[in-house]
Image (cartoon, helix red, strand yellow):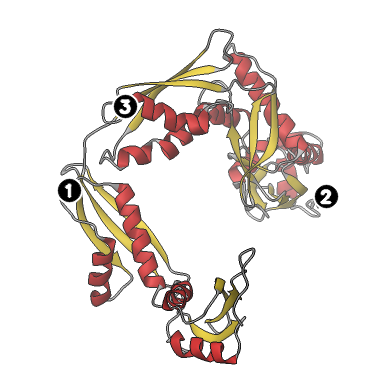
């Protein structure tokens, strides 16, 4: 729907008519635009929208000019509707107050560039120079994608690396998408990676680690850097190299018969850091002391983030055992580059506390069920420990109170409304071995 409202001056004083006629000839209503505003915009700035219209303060207000400006906004494909109006302004200087009303297309998705020459920043700056409304996020319409692809093709041609460019909506996570622009041709795959500068970790170990995730995948520098960070950075952080860098990444084709790219990576390992303070946030003092003991980290030695993450897992397990089933434990690090140490903070978010509810026992007669209930040891209302049921079944088996006891298992039903955990224990009889019968 296009909204167009044009207000003109219905009456003017004789002096204003004379001044307007003197300025514009025989048309006394051809007055300048004295102000311009934009309403309805949320994702795009008024400045960018006005730049796209071509209308400026001081321009003569004519219907043709505003129609042309409206059409320019429509042609961007970024607006569901565009309207305008201009009204006479009160004051000594005759003229109009103009207003554009827009309704923006939603949703917008972040733009990503893959396999194109230059950096993302260089491509983005080029697009901004061609389109005042380019913000790095766009609606995934064919009109928008085609226009940006044309701009990017012009960019690649200007760099003497012309390429046919396509754009498409790509998933990058659950309910998370980007509009990706890339060459309309298969990207070369990673076939081999070679490293320089590494001392703490030998090259075969590095190659095996990166090869497990990179070999055979289409190469882009962004994605390859993500693989380096995901695979190799944790290996270095386990050795205390907290500021390891992957630099001077370059590629070259591997001669036939091998197909693909050789990727060269320079590793700057940096200094080895020590473990500084270790603290707990989200627990009482008594609990903090106990949880720090559970984490088992000793300040002063070389920091090992494999061990730090294991400590976080131990803290989480300890808190779950006292009823906080949905607890999360995150690790915050503060790196002191002067003293070459890392302070660690475990942030504990307990969530709601859960307690044991009903106990159901399947597969036993009344006597057997009664014996198990007496052994159970937990009452409704006791803090729910998710490890307890399986531990209890192991104890029952070790106690040997049932002849020919077969596999057992436990199941739990979590009640989010009452924060209770109803446990079911299931027992089965051992299957007789061929040729043997159980005694009566």
Residue in front for this viewpoint, 189 or 46: 189
Q: Tell me the crowding category of disc 1: few under 14, some 14 to 19, or many 20 or more residues within 10 angstroms, Cα based.
A: few
Residue 378 in sight in this render: no
Q: Quadrant of residue 250?
A: top left
Count of numbered tags: 3
- Please identify the quadrant where the C terminus is shown: bottom right
- Residue drawn at the location 80% of the way across and 50% of the way down: 6
**3D distance between C-alphas at marks 2 and 3:** 66 Å
Label located before the other in sequence (2 or 3): 2
Secondary structure found at label 2: loop
CA distance separating discs 1 and 2: 69 Å
The residue labelled by disc 2 is 2
Q: Which residue is mark 1?
A: 301
Instruction: Characterize the local packing of mark 3: few (<14), some (14-19) or many (20 or more) Cα atoms within 10 angstroms.
Output: few
Compared to 380, does 409 lie above or below? above
> Which numbered dot is residue 202?
3
* Element class at badge 3: loop
Toward the right, the furthest residue is 1
In x, y percent, where is residue 153? 66, 21
Image x and y of residue 56, in percent? 64, 38
């Amino acid at each position: 729907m296009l909204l167009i409202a044009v207000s003109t001056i219905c009456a003017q004083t004789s002096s204003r008519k004379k001044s307007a006629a003197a300025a514009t000839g025989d048309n006394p209503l051809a007055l300048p635009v004295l102000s311009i505003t934009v309403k309805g915009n949320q994702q795009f700035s008024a400045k960018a929208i006005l730049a796209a219209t071509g209308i400026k303060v001081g321009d003569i207000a004519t219907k043709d000019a505003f129609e042309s400006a409206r059409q320019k906004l429509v042609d961007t494909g970024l607006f569901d509707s565009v309207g305008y109006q201009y009204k006479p302004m009160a004051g000594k200087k005759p003229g109009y107050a103009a207003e554009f009303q827009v309704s923006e297309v939603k949703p917008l998705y972040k733009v990503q560039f893959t396999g194109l020459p230059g950096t993302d920043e260089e491509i983005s700056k080029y697009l901004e120079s061609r389109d005042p409304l380019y913000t790095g996020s766009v609606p995934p319409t064919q009109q928008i994608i085609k226009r940006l692809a044309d701009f990017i093709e012009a960019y690649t041609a200007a760099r003497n690396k012309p390429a046919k460019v396509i754009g498409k909506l790509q998933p990058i996570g659950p309910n998370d998408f980007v509009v990706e622009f890339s060459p309309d041709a298969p990207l070369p795959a990673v076939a081999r990676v070679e490293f320089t500068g590494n001392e703490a970790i030998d090259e075969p170990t590095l190659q095996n680690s990166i090869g497990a995730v990179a070999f055979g995948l289409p190469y882009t520098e962004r994605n390859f850097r993500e693989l380096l960070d995901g695979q190799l950075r944790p290996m270095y952080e386990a050795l205390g190299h907290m500021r390891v860098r992957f630099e001077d990444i370059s590629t070259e084709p591997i001669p036939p018969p091998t197909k693909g790219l050789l990727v060269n990576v320079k590793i700057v390992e940096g200094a080895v850091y020590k473990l500084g303070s270790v603290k707990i946030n989200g627990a009482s003092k008594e609990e903090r002391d106990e949880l720090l003991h559970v984490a088992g980290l000793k300040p002063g030695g070389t920091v090992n983030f494999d061990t730090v993450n294991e400590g976080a897992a131990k803290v989480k397990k300890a808190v779950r055992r006292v009823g906080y089933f949905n607890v999360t434990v995150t690790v915050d690090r503060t790196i002191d580059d002067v003293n070459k140490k890392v302070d660690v903070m475990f942030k504990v978010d307990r969530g709601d506390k859960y307690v044991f509810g009903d106990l159901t026992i399947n597969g036993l007669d009344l006597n057997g069920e009664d014996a198990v209930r007496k052994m159970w040891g937990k009452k409704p209302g006791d803090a729910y420990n998710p490890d307890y049921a399986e531990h209890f079944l192991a104890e029952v088996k070790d106690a040997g109170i049932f002849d020919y006891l077969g596999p057992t298992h436990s199941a739990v039903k979590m009640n989010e409304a009452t924060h209770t955990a109803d446990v079911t224990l299931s027992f089965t009889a051992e299957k007789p071995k061929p040729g043997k019968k159980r005694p009566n």
